[in-house]
Structures are given as structure tokens and as C-alpha cells.
Image (spheres, rainbow, N blue to C red):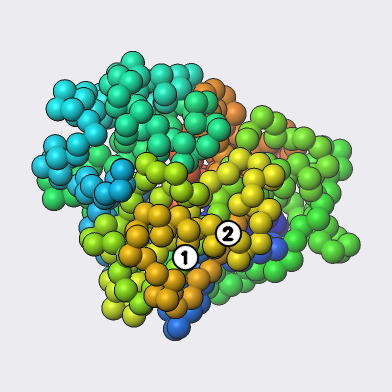
Amino acid sequence: MTVAVIGAGLSGLCAGYELSKKGIDVAIFEKGEIGGLVSSYNINNYHIEKYYHHIFRSDETILKLISDLGLGSKLKWLKGTTGYYNNGKIYPLNTPGEILQYPYLSLFEKVKLASLVLRSKRKNIEDSDNITAKDFILNTAGKSVYENFFEPLLKSKFGDEKDTVSASWLLSRIKIRSDRSLGGERLGYLKGGFYLLVEAMLKEIEDRGGEIKKTPVNKLIIKDNKVNGIETDNKFISCDNIISTTSATVLNKIIGTPLIKGIKYQGTTCAIFALKERLMENIYWLNIKADVPFGAVIEHTNFALFDDYGEHLVYVTSYFNDLNNPLWKMSEEKVIKLYLDGLKKLFPGFNESVIKWWKLTRNIDTAPIFETGFRNKVLPYKTKIRGLYLAGMFSLPNYPERSMNGSIKAGSGCVKKILEDEFAEEKKC
């Protein structure tokens, strides 16, 4: 059996890793960076992810993979502190005492917020798929909690789509982040970056005879409703099965028909700045209620050790929903100027002279918009085309919120389905 995997993100690499372990002939095709959304910059003798990442203690699949690849000693559980910027001031929100001191909710509203969190932990996620996050918050905690706490977060994440996002997405976010001690939350990170995870899978695949081909797949060759192969730069490559881990947009293009319908994506613009000095004091993740062109500021070196980098690393990120958004159309330099103006507004003492370097990355299909009814759009691994399988952000393990853990589960789950189908075919013969 030969398998072509389209995309070398986490789902594609995990699929290739699992197939190569079984001795199956596998080739992975990637037109961009190996690692996809987990790819990294190599700067000043260290690697740093292009997009911020961390893992949770409940992410059992990625934790096992890290252990299996011999990276367990690199995994560190670090304090991930959060804050909320409102009306010119940063409010830490990590302990019960800090939450009680937050001035933009009354004590009664804070009790309602706590009740919402407790209710969310008990509620079945799929049962809330047809309810908007907005309605769930309004019905559970009231208008003030929505407007003064949740609405800015939803707006920064989903923009004009904020009122369509399902309560299932919100519940999943609350559940995964509710496992914290009185001192705050601990998040997982690999010392040396998740680059190590990508490279370890890559090495295992190649050591077992698998191939990584840095070339785009231009077309899937389907004959009589069965996979026949793929076409890359006018070269035909035969294969028995295809695993596509691309977005729905890309898959529909290379297959030549709208196989996947109804899934809307959002894009992301993410800048990273290396600074000579710290931007925030002991805050890793800053949520923002202010008129700035980004929704969060993430100071990576208030999470991972500064000594591992020798410079302060700060992410600034925005989400957008269409190709006409200025963040997608503007030059990198103009986006950076926009971000710097926003940082100066939040931090009046911030000066561009402290910037050592910056990098910007953009992606139009970063994640699906998990709107109401999305559960019915989740795609099975097996398609109606024989030999064509799908794994990625639209797979069940990534519902109702994408994650590195979900992408790895999707890759391995897809391989399991292929092997089940092959075994069933062999039994027929």
C-alpha cells in the first residue's frame, strides 16, 4: 500500500509517522513550511514558533507522542499568567483574589461569572452546538458580564462573526482552562520549542523510509470514483490512498469539485517582536478591551525562560474573516506600523528603540469559524471517494476548538481508519 499525505502540519506529520511505523510506503507533500501552523523561525541560534503555542495537562495524545519521541525531559510545565487590559490599566486575573479586585464587574456579577464557569464544566458540549455563545452568556450571567468581560474577547477572536459562534466553542475553552490551582494555571511547553516535536516526527518518518517532498500538489487524480494518484508540477505520482490535511478551500481546488461545503475559515496575522526590555510585568497573556488593531498581546518570555532566548519575545495577533481585510492586503511594514501604534496606545512608555527585530506571518485559513450548527459540518475521515481520506481542523478531534492535540489525534485517527478499511478489504478476498 502506498499513501500520499498532503500537508506537513501536525496532522500530516502524525499520519506519516503512524504509517511509517507500520512499514507503509508514505510520502508527504508540502508547498510551505514543514510544521504548518507550528513551524518556527530560526533566529540567533534558537527556534521560536511563528504562532504562539502551549499545551494543557488534559492533552493526553500529544503528551504521549512527546514521550514516545524521547522528548519528555524537554517538557516543562510553566505558569501561564493572564491579564485583562481595560480603561488604561492591566488587571491580573489568575487568582480568586485578583478576580475579586477586578473593578468592571460587581460582586454579584462575579458570582454570576463563577456560576457560568461551573455550569460550563458540567454542561455537555455538543448539546450547546445550536446556541450562540452570546445567548448562553446573556442567559447565564447577564448583560453586564457579557459586555464587560466576554464581548471584547469574542470580538477580537471572531470579528463580525462573534454573534454566530456557538456556545460549544465557548464551553470547550472554559473547560480546558478550568484546571488550575489557586496560584494560577500551568501550561506545557517544550524547552527548545515545538520545533523539536516537528523535527522528531520528521526524522522518524525519514529513518523508516518515508519521504518529505517540498512541492505543491496541483491535482488529485480520481478515476471511477477511486484515487489513482496525484499531480505535482505536471508530474503524475501513483498511490493507493490519499490523506488530505489541507483546508477545505485548498482541497476543493485541487480535486476540482466542491467536496467540502459550508465551512467558513478565518485568517490570522501574527507578529513577533524581540525587545531589549520587558513589555509587561509578569503577564503572559493579555486580553484587551480597547480600540487597537489586535485582540491579544502574548509575552512569550513571561512564560518560557528569558535565558533560553536572551531577548524578550512578544506576540501581537489579530484575526480576520475575508480577503479584503487591510491586515491581509497591506504590506508587512504597514501592518507592523499599525501594531506599533496600538502598542504605544496600550503602553505609553513603549518606544520603538527597544525593538531588536520583528517578523510577521499571515495565513488566510488558520481555523474554521465554529458557528452554531458546526457539529453537523464535522467531516469523517473517510470520504465518498474510495481511497481519499481527510484529517485536519474540520475533523472531530478538533471540534469545537482546534488544538495541537486535536490535530495529532486527527492524523492518527485517520491512519487507523485506513488500516481498518484495508483489513476489511483483505477479508473480502
Classify 238 as above or below 381: below
Instruction: Locate residue 289 relative to residue 243 in the image: left or right.
Output: left
Q: Which residue is mark 1?
A: 272
Name the residue at 24% across, 62% down.
281
Side of 336 where 94 appears, left or right: left
Judging by the rendered image, the residue that carries numbered circle 2 is 335
Tag 1 secondary structure: strand
Q: Residue furthest bottom?
A: 45
Query: Judging from the image, what secondary structure is the residue with disc 2 in?
Result: helix
**Would residue 231 be visible to someone looking at this image?**
yes
Quadrant of the rendering where the C terminus is positioned: top right
Q: Position of residue 214 (x, y in %)?
A: 70, 69
Using the image, determine if residue 269 lies above or below residue 300. above
Q: Earlier in the sequence, mark 1 or mark 2?
A: 1
- The residue sitting at 19% across, 39% down in the picture is 102
Tell me the residue at 35%/46% (across/down): 287
Is residue 58 in sight in this rendering? no
At 43% from the left and 35% from the top, the residue drawn is 154
Disc 1 crowd rating (10 Å Cα; few below 14, some 14-19, many 20+) is many
- How far apart, in angstroms, are the residues tagged by discs 1 and 2? 12 Å
Residue type at mark 1: give it.
Ile
Residue 176, given in percent of the width and then of the height, sits at: 32, 41
Q: Of residues 303 and 373, which is closer to you in this image?
A: 303
